[in-house]
Image (cartoon, rainbow, N blue to C red):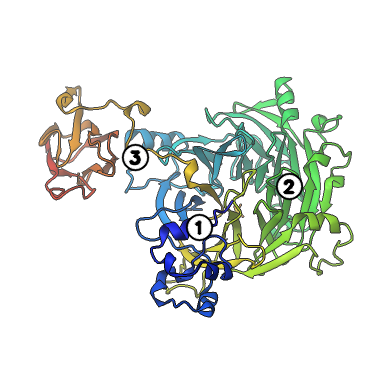
Amino acid sequence: AIDSETAAEKRDPLFSRIPRRDFMKAGAAAGAMGSLAGCTGLLSDDDDDLAAAGDVDSYVPPGEHDDYYAFLSGGHSGEIRVYGIPSMRQLMRIPVFGRESARGYGYDDRTSEMLEEAGGYSWGDTHHPRVSQTDNDYDGRWAFVNDKANGRMARIDLEYFETDAIVDIPNQQGTHGACCLLPDTKYVFGVGEFRVPMPNDGQDLDDPENYTSTIAAINPETMNVEWEVLVDGNMDNGDGSKQGRWFFATGYNSESATTESGMSSSDTDWVKAFDVPAIEDAVEAGEYEEINGVPVVDGTRDSALNSGDRPIVRYVDVAKSPHGVSVTPDNQYAIASGKLDPTATVIDIEQLAEVDDPNDAIVARPTLGMGPLHTAYDGRGHAYTTLFIDSQVVKWDIEAAVDAYPDDEPEGGDQESPAVVEKIDVHYNPGHLIAAESYTADPQGDWLISLNKLSKDRFLPVGPMHPENDQLIYIGDDEEGMKLVKDTPSYAEPHDASIVSADKLDPAKVYDPEDYDEEYIEPDASDIIREDGHVHVKMHSQRNEFGFQEVTVQEGDEVTFTVTNIEQTPDVLHSLAIPEHDVNIKLAPQETREVTFTADEPGVYWMYCAFFCSALHLEMRSRLIVEPA
Ligand code: CUK
Ligand code: CUA
């Protein structure tokens, strides 16, 4: 997947000064030029210098573009961040569950109504950004992300890089896992983590054995929750198989406990494998209970639907408290692992459909190290698993682990599996890791990011709340091994990411007015419509003016501004900001937004544009005059 002539030649004007063989020697099959790119002037032709500095090329010179987009979750910041890979430059932030003033998100009428209808909360907790696929490859349409705090799923339109839909999932309190059922994103699954009474209406409070959690199958087009399945125990992360049949979820509380010691008392928990077509058949046949408007199918172990020939949920025993689960690119295995046991469990997906006892589908259980959490793939048969406690990434050979099983079954779990290829230290305590296009059928196999929870001493101190550390690791050279290339401080708290080749996205450079409901206001359509205490101001904006130099309203009027930025030139943004009225809408070229507020304080207010749009930006302002009633 790597173009060996690549990047460095195209990018770096100094490349031609350095003999090609030196790059190869430096282990830089990726067109590698290395760490050094920042100090190329110091390079001599000496082989040793190069080898010593020898790294891989992650340098993207000014004015050049990255090879990949990475979509990182922002945890309880409630947003998504977009990085360029391999530069690790933060390109954009996409607010999802909370208001954000730079983009006017949650300030205009449409986005504020969307947030209100999705529950009216001011924040969310994003963990798993997953990008839609068609035929097992990224199609550039949407990203989806969960809200662990309030049981929601959001959709981000990748034409505009903005959140365009949020569904408040009934019967789910904390939606943790999120993923797409492939090959064509038939559903987006939300995985319910917090077990609660069903329905959670105050009738039945202190009976934890009866609490349940569900997975929710969401239609990506309509964002409608089509059905849910309730299960024994809780759930955590999830991943869908590449060929439509299975959806896998881990869970760390098969004990149905409500305390930490209770939740970790048993030596095993489950990976639940949901047989999606069998569930669809059950829904079709009416074998569900409708709860809060959603068909809920009973997938508990002893349910009728799990007692027949084709159980709808298969409970696979895995070592206690599994956390991550991910399906290999070839759709052969689902690999799960957890914080409290040094092994990963490899489940053979084909066998799962054939065996009577789902545990017979376990085909490997390699001992990897302390605290294995999440696994990513390079498309060359390797798995990369974060070791939370060891602060390492371990690279291992999946087939070697299968071949060694069950002879490598650890006695007490202390012998490292022969499948382990290599370990690299990361700094410090990694949660997820993600490799380029690892969630597709064809990973790129060059870059991997370790999302580390702690940075400790890696950056200048900035007070007691430290940044986290997202580390870029080159995995493209199996002979030279993994190389740690870059530290990137990040704001709390990325949990997971998706890395997408740049050529698979085609973001808009200006808005297409057809894509939105708001009325496009041409300069000659500017108007002020007054009726019954409501004033509707329709105006355009452009360098360096709004459609009206002044707008006069009465104290107590409800005022709506509909404003169009009529600029055609990319990147010329305006906004409408009104002091002391909490009004702030962003207007990219050809964008129209509406905002409604009450003018309740008599006085003069300078409406201004907050984007520095031209030499006369500061002059781009008009008066809002509020006359006393
Ligand atoms: S994640 Cu949500 S607790 Cu490991 Cu997939 Cu961080
Ligand atoms: Cu328009 Cu500043």
Q: Is mark 1 within 8 Å of ligand 1?
A: yes
Residue at point 56% right, 68% down?
484
Residue 334 numbered mark, or none: 2
Q: Amino acid at mark 2?
A: Ala
Residue 45 is tagged as none
How many C-alpha atoms fall within 10 Å of the one at disc 3: few (<14), some, or many (≥20)?
A: some
CA distance for labels 1 and 2: 26 Å
Mark 1: which secondary structure? loop
Tell me if 189 is positioned left or right of 353 in this view: left
Residue holding disc 1 = 493
Specify the quadrant that holds the C terminus: top left
Dot 1 or dot 2, earlier in sequence = 2
The residue labelled by disc 3 is: 509
Contact between labelled residues 3 and 1, with CB atoms less than 8 Å apart: no
Compared with 28, 203 (above or below) is above
Mark 2 or mark 3, earlier in chain: 2
Residue type (three-letter) at the residue carrying disc 1: Glu
Mark 3 residue type: Lys
Q: Nearer the viewer, mark 1 or mark 2?
A: 2
Is the residue 94 above or below the residue 591 in the image? Answer: below
Q: Is mark 2 within 8 Å of ligand 1?
A: no
Identified at 80% across, 65% down, the residue is: 418
- Ranked by sequence position, the earlier of labels 1 and 3 is 1
User: Can you give x and y, in whole percent of width and height, for residue 446 in the image?
Assistant: 58, 57
Quarter of image, ligand 1: bottom right
How far apart in space, not on screen, are marks 1 and 3 (Cα)?
29 Å
In the image, 96: left or right of 610?
A: right
Q: Residue 486, can we see it?
A: yes
